Structures are given as C-alpha cells and as structure tokens.
Amino acid sequence: MISAAVSPQPPAAPLAALPLPWPDLQREAQFQAWLGPVVAMHGLDPATLRMASADASFRRYFRLQRAEGGSCIIMDAPPDKENCRPFVQVAQLMQAAGVRVPQVLDWNETHGFMLLTDLGEQTLLSALDAAQPAAALPYFKDATAALQDWQRASRPAVLPDYDAALLQRELQLFPDWYLAQHKGVALDDAQRTMLAQTFAQIIERNLAAPCVFVHRDFMPRNLMLPRGGFEPGDPARRLGVLDFQDAVYGPITYDMASLLRDAFLSWDEEMVLDVTIRYWEQARKAGLLDFDGWSDDFGAFYRAVDWMALQRHLKVAGIFARLTLRDGKPSYLADAPRFIHYIRSTALRYRELTPLLRLIDKVEGWQAASGYAYGRA
C-alpha cells in the first residue's frame, strides 16, 4: 500500500524507546506516531528496530523484523531535505520492467517515512574480489541483463532529461570542489578556458548517444544479493537494485560506465572489456544500439562509454570532496584517488584530452606521461 498518510489505526501498545539517534524530539515523535499503526498493520516487531545503513544523502535506513519471519526496511527521508516522489515513481517503473527492487508498503509523504520490502543485507560489492574476475562474471551478466530490462522499458518524457545543463553542473563540481576546495588550486585563465573547452567536448559527445532510462549510480554497492542465494534464472533470486531515485532519461552508455568503473573496486581492463562486449552483443540484438555504427563496431561503442565515464569520474571526484568538506563525511574523499586514476587513464587514450592530462599531473604532483599509451585514439 502506498499512501500519503498512514491509516489512523492505533498501536496495540505503546512503543518502547527506540535505540536510534534523532536530530530532535519532534522528528522522533513523528516517527513514533507513524510507526505504531504500521507495526500493527504489517506484523512488525518494534523491539527489533535497528540501523541498517546511511548513504551520501540525508536518508537513513532501518531494519525491522516481521513477527512471522523476514524483515522490512524503513526509509527516514526528512522532507525538507529529500523528495521521495522520484523514489516511488522509479520503483514502479523498474518493477514494471522486471527489475527486482523494493516494494513500497507504506509511505507517509508528509513526514518522509517509508516502509519497504527488504532485498537483503549483502551487497554485490561485498561478494566481489578484483583478483577473481571469473567468479564475478555471473553476477555481472545478471546485472547487465537487469540493466537491459530497464533500458528496453525506456520512453521519453517520463523521467527528467539528462541534458546539457545537468551534465555541465555535474562537471563543474570538479573545479569547484576537488580543485579549488580540496586541492587549493586557483586556476589561471588558460586553465579555466581549457576546462571549459574540454567540458563542452565531453557534453557534446555524450549527448550524441541514444537515450534510455538511466539509473545513474548502477554499481555493485547498489546491487543486492538475495537471501535465498543468487540464481540468475529465478526472478526472485536475481540481483536486487537500490538507490535509483535520481534516475533520468539520458545516454545509454552511463550505467555501463558506472558498473565497471566503480567507486570502491577497480577491475583490470580485460575484465571491463569482457563484460562490456557481452553487454554490447545482447544490447545490439535488442535494438538498443542502432546508432552511428555501434551495432557493427564495438570500438565505437566502447569509446563512447569511455567519454561517458570521464564525465562521471570528474563529477564524482567533486562530489566526494564536497561530501567531506561540506557534509563531514571523510570516508568518501579517501576513494577520490581511484577516480583521479580513472580520469588520467581515459585522458591518456585520447589526444584531445592531453591538456586535461597535463592539468591532472600538475595538480597531483605527477610527472607528465609521454610516448604511446595503449588505446590512444
């Protein structure tokens, strides 16, 4: 059931004090008032309420056991900081496409509380080892199959467009937060001009790609292993998908760039190529890549993924700096070097990105690379 306010059913008994931190007594009281009827309606045990996770936003997640077995997830999303409507909309779109996502059981839109089905406690990231790519391959095959289910359901004018303005705002996070705030770099006129020209080129290339529904953070940390064991052929035991509320309608290359150039785990290029080729073969059969020769030329598609990934890497480096410096979440900036490596590796491939490569090397104090680099185009 999805509702803007819960049914006015009183709890069977007063709830015990909850072992959770709250920003103020008013929000805790709102939560208690919402939770009472929800506990009675869905057969939940309030004594089992525990923190499940928190993310880079202002959302928090709690886990609550069912009296008859199993568990549910509660989302705490303060409405002055988080809008839950996109989450509800995208959950419905993904579920209709056959993707395993949480079902919304109850939603108090006024105060930003939501009861969800529980996809499990183990992320795909926790099951992966970069030193064992063969063991990871079945998971990635299932992830790309789910991704194509989602992409085949795409249609325009349903989700916000991933347009030039949004791409530019995201790119600007890199000079504003990573360079200026984190590294203390004051760009000169020539460097600002170079970045503006590079960003324009990145945007132009990425907006040329066909558009589909884009998850926008499709990576192993947001894919969940089912409790009953992973089984790709069983819809109930496939990977689950979380953190989809920022979905947009944009370049088909974006989610593949997210999946294989991860924020917390790096793969050898052989693995990246293997999974991307498998995706490409299935996607062209599904008619998703009928664009600019992509169906016949894997190299053209792979170069497009490279340029989309570059936009994401620049954005994420800026976001990780902002999360640390503005929001007090230092663990994110610890992973920023991975993205700087991704940026540099991509810039090495393409001559038109040489000025960006030189800037990165200067900022990071590295000696500029010279000579031929594999994959340079």
Image: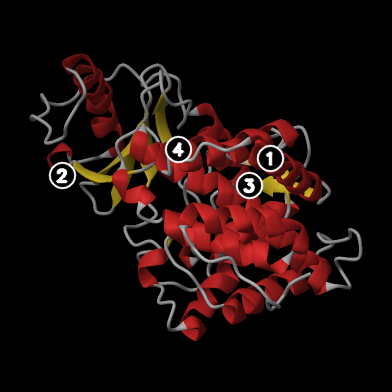
The numbered mark, 4 or 3, whose residue comes first in the sequence reads 3
Q: In this view, does 29 lie to the left or right of 224?
A: left
Q: Report x, y in % for residue 174.
A: 54, 42
Q: Mark 2 and 4 residues: CB-CB less than 8 Å, in contact? A: no
Mark before the other along the chain sequence, 2 or 1: 2
Name the amino acid type tagged 2: Thr
Frontmost of labels 2 and 1 is 1
In three-dimensional space, the C-alpha distance between marks 3 and 2, rounded to whole angstroms, equals 32 Å
- Residue 178 appears at what percent x and percent y? 47, 43
Specify which label sits upstream in the sequence, 3 or 2. Answer: 2
Give the quarter of the figure containing the C terminus.
bottom right
Residue topped by disc 4 = 104
Tell me the crowding category of disc 4: few under 14, some 14 to 19, or many 20 or more residues within 10 angstroms, Cα based.
Answer: some
Q: Disc 1 or disc 3, which is closer to the eye?
A: 1
- The answer to whether mark 1 and mark 3 are in CB contact below 8 A is no
Q: Residue 74 carries which label?
A: none
Q: Is mark 3 on a helix, strand or loop?
A: helix
Q: On the image, numbered disc 3 is attached to which residue?
A: 96
Spatial CA distance of label 2 from label 4 is: 20 Å
Cα distance between the residues tagged 1 and 4? 51 Å
Q: Which amino acid does label 3 sit on?
A: Ala
Circle 1 residue = 190
For disc 3, the neighbor class at 10 Å (few under 14, some 14 to 19, many from 20) is few
Q: Which amino acid does label 1 sit on?
A: Ala
